[in-house]
Image: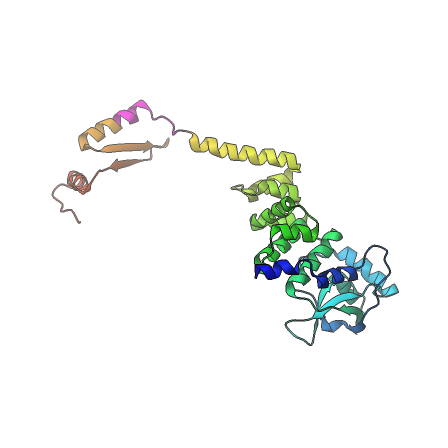
Amino acid sequence: MADKTERRGLGRGLSALMADLPQGDAPPRAPDRDVPIATVRPNPDQPRRHFDDGDLSDLAASIRTRGVLQPIIVRTDPADGAYLQIIAGERRWRAAQMAGLHEIPVLVREMDDAAVLEVAIVENIQRSDLNPLEEAVGYRTLLDRYGHTQERLGDLVGRSRSHIANALRLTTLPDDVQAHLRSGALTAGHARALVGADNAGDLAKRIISGGLSVRETERLVKSDAEGKRVSARRPAPEKDADTAALERDLGAALRMRVSIDAKPGGEGRVTITYKDLDALDDLCQLLAPGRPVQS
């Protein structure tokens, strides 16, 4: 299986498909055909989840005037052969719907699921269309579902292995922190500083409300962690002389270790530690003389 994946590499099909993607001011590719827009579906594994409404409205206005200049790249929908599934161009498809088009131009290319996700990630990264979490989730899907390695991912998207590794760490953050990252309230730098923090959600709120920089965030996380370590090492406060004397006297009378935790309001707790069941029996006889012990 691993050998098969390695041999496929980018693959001649994927390389050819990347050439079909619109590049800068390159002239549009001629579509294979026009199809009813209702027969085209988005890819459920598309890494991009957020589409800016303002950008879509602007593109829809352009499409009403000039039409869809770059055809949408599709494949036969694996779930239903009567439909086509988008490989690249979901933004244009959404805007065409807003513009009220009934048909759209398409290029039909048949590719497997892994190659389709690869293209979606590469296309969106080239256009800076993915937020950091969408990018990380795309990488995670290729690793977990399709057996990619971090090295292969780096070659595929033109990123270093450290970039891939740092991106993947974002998927370990709590859901509330991921939501802040997805919305743009936190940057990837802020989020990476929070990875592994015990109370990342609370720290994220402080970062956002305080408008902290990434460096300030790193210092906050470090200070919070050091404070917890100091608190864990801090010894219990010394007991007053009267409480300590009462512990000794009661312990001597019972021939057991006694601990008294007294609170300022007068309430407290007495803890008696016994070493075996015979000692427990003796304690019960002292507390309730003549009462049989239930074993």
**Quadrant of the frame with the N terminus:** bottom right
Magenta span has 244? yes
x then y, percent, for residue 145: 58, 60
What residue occupies the far left of the structure in this picture? 290
Residue at 65% x, 37% y: name it.
214
Up-down relation of residue 127 to residue 1 (above or below): above
Between residue 197 and residue 30, name the one nearer to us: 30
Magenta span has 192? no
Residue at 19% x, 33% y: name it.
254
Q: How is the image coloured?
A: rainbow
Is residue 202 rendered to the left or right of residue 283?
A: right
Which stretch is magenta? 235-246
Between residue 163 and residue 183, name the one nearer to us: 163
Confirm whether residue 157 shows in the render: yes
What residue occupies the far top of the structure in this picture? 241
What residue occupies the far bottom of the structure in this picture? 82
Between residue 269 and residue 39, name the one nearer to us: 39
Confirm whether residue 212 shows in the render: no
| Figure label count | 0
Is residue 142 rendered to the left or right of residue 248?
A: right
Residue at 64% x, 62% y: name it.
114
Is residue 237 rendered to the left or right of residue 117?
A: left
x then y, percent, for residue 19: 78, 60
Residue 269: name its quadrant: top left
x then y, percent, for residue 37: 76, 71
x then y, percent, for residue 252: 20, 29
Residue 144: name its quadrant: bottom right
